[in-house]
Amino acid sequence: MTKTPKKTYQLKQKVQSHQHLEYLSFSDVDPLSVLSDYYTNHKMIVPHKGTIPKEKTSLLEQKKEIKIAKRYIKLHLHRTITLEETANKVFLSPYYFSKLFKSEVGITFIAYVNHQKMIHASELLRNSDLTISHIAQSLGFTQMSYFSKTFKKEFEMTPKEYRKNPTS
């Protein structure tokens, strides 16, 4: 003889207590379908114990996605990195990824990518003899003027001035 689970027994008691269902015997009712119906009808009212609410799960995932995106950016500083390709890497739409990135990091995706590239450029200017144009190309900049403008915005001096006096 099999033992009736507590929940099934409780449901049986509820079913048998309803007057309009008195004609049914418990043997006519499939316990699995009763449980399935019960949980389907009550899952919105009574959350399962031990589960993380959906909002918290997505917050945990968001942080993970941003970490993955930042790692991806650092690994691909040598070329042009687009918002769309990075969003695809973390399986988010570009629009949502853009909003999420700004809310988590505090700056836009492009500003973050350029900041990381400028940090790397400053290290190369200080520690190598590479030409400024070679450094710009090695960081995915196709136009020297855009590289210089971005560098000056970050460090308040041109790459040439920085190379001469990196401590200013």
Image: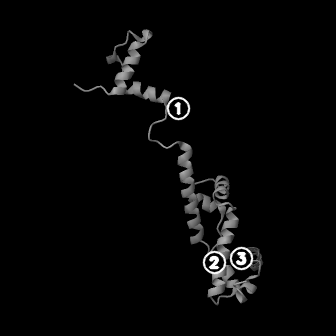
Label number found at residue 120: 2
Label number found at residue 137: none
Can you give x and y, in whole percent of width and height, for residue 32 in the image?
Answer: 37, 27
C-alpha separation, residue under disc 3 versus residue under disc 1:
54 Å
Left or right? Give the position of 155 relative to 53. right
Please identify the quadrant where the C terminus is shown.
bottom right
Which circle's residue, 2 or 3, is located before the other in the chain?
Answer: 2
The residue identified by callout 3 is 142
C-alpha separation, residue under disc 1 versus residue under disc 2:
51 Å
Can you give x and y, in whole percent of width and height, for residue 73 in the image?
Answer: 60, 68
The residue identified by callout 1 is 44
C-alpha separation, residue under disc 2 versus residue under disc 3:
17 Å
Q: Let me know if residue 160 appears in the view.
A: yes
Q: Residue at x 68, y 75 (%)?
A: 118
Q: Is residue 80 above or below residue 16?
A: below
Can you give x and y, in whole percent of width and height, for residue 43 in the image?
Answer: 49, 32
Left or right? Give the position of 160 relative to 94. right
Q: Residue at x 61, y 58 (%)?
A: 87
